Image: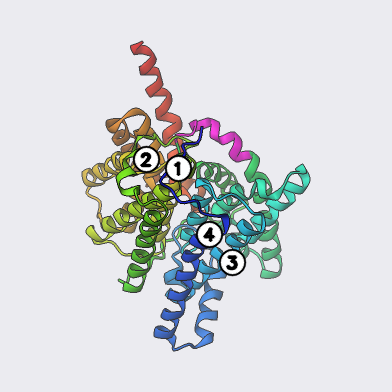
Amino acid sequence: MQIINIDEKEIGKNHKILILLVFPLSIFMCGIVTWLIEANFNLNSILIGLKDIISSPTTLYTDFLAVGGVSSALINSALIGFFNLYFLRKYKLRLNGLLIAAFMTVIGFSFFGKNIFNIIPIYLGGFFYSKYQKIEFKDIILSIMFGTALSPVISQISFSGILPLHISIPVGLIVGIFIGFVIVPLSTHMLKFHEGYNIYNIGFTSGILGTVLTSILRSINVEVESANILYTDKNYILLFLLLFQFVFLIVIGILINKKCILSYKSILKYKGRTVTDFTFLVGYGITFFNMGILGLISLAFVLAVGGIINGPVIAAIFSLVGFGAFGKHIKNCFPVALGVSIFALIFHNDFSSTNIIITVLFSTTLAPIAGSFGFFTGIIAGMLHYTLATNINVIHGGLNLYNNGFAGGLVAGFLVPIIEAFKKGEK
């Protein structure tokens, strides 16, 4: 049953779209400002940057801020944000927690891995699947949005030089359409493996499919390896952009529900296991407030450890913020992140490195384990996640952008049955 929040103002579908519009719009404006600073409105510079982004193989970790420049990476992300908002508005979808999470995740990963070329075939595949199954495309668009985790497959085939471009690009597009066609039924079945304790379900699905595709490519002597192209400059425009967006969420939350600060504790009682839609359970005011709080905490963590705000870090922060509408809050995220941090310290990792920062942030995909089984179990889940997430990308060769979702699915599928076994033993 939905919990009716009498303190919350009613907001229409168009107003919710406008709230989400702030994100690609502010990113686009920052892209224009950066373009002015970097190139004095030289159109060639931004077009060359976008061309470099589109024509890169985009495997983990291919940071578009480094590949195409800051302004081009921002424009790429904004365009993808507008593209997805178009579908949300066209099909008049109810903006529930999972759709908000998908939208934010796609925007975040548009800074590394997803571009305006390699996501389109996956949408086409989903469209063909809906026609083949005689279902509405709007009913599967959520899975397709998340399914763009495998967009590097299209870029890898198209631009890695394995075939002449006039052959490789059509082959890449066909494979992308195939991915979009099969990702929906696969994700439904994969959910059973981790029983909803891994929030990034399609990350796990994409890891399985990415592993199969990588194995096929390697069997025909096509080398598939992760990249390590990272933006390494401190950029205050990016910092202020993120600060503005997260403060905006907090302010919007308060405007929708003036008592959301006092009522915030109500969200902490939820365990986070799929399906935990906070827009349905506590309303949009507290949901947006929660998202903003998670964003500021994530940003504070990155700055505290001396990290760089680059493409993968932005993706990790946006994913955490997005799923603040669907299962994540401070209480169930902290134990898992702490578990990763403990192992990172034990193994003497550099906490300011991008790899450790994003592993800490993405590990919160296992927040439902901490929410369901307690603080110390959450720490154990985080420790296990560290060991898998830092090693498992070799299996899919970086073709699955949601590497931590893949690792989280394996951790949940392994750990939860053991926990349940001990609980039954106690009885």
The tag on residue 15 is 4
- Say few, some or many: other residues with alpha carbon within 10 Å of mark 2 (under 14 / 14 to 19 / 20 or more): many
State which tag comes first along the sequence, 2 or 3.
Answer: 3
**Residue type beneath disc 3:** Ile
x, y percent for residue 216: 61, 47
- Whole-angstrom CA distance, mark 1 to mark 2, is 8 Å
Contact (Cβ within 8 Å) of mark 1 with mark 2:
yes
Depth check: give the residue in front, 168 or 258. 258
Q: Name the image quarter holding residue 184.
A: top right
Q: Nearer the viewer, mark 2 or mark 3?
A: 2
Question: Where is mark 1, residue-wise?
Answer: 278
Figure check: 155 above or below 416: below
Neighbours of disc 4 within 10 Å: few (<14), some (14-19), many (20+) = few
- Disc 4 is placed on an element classified as helix
The crowd level at tag 1 (other Cα within 10 Å; few <14, some 14-19, many 20+) is: many
**Residue 267 shows which numbered tag?**
2
Relative to 260, residue 3 above or below: above
Residue wearing tag 3 = 116
For mark 2, give the secondary structure.
Answer: helix
Q: Say whether residue 249 is magenta.
A: no
Amino acid marked by disc 4:
His
Q: Which range is magenta?
A: 186-197
Question: What count of labels does the image hold?
Answer: 4
Q: Earlier in the sequence, mark 1 or mark 3?
A: 3
Q: Disc 1 or disc 3, which is closer to the eye?
A: 1
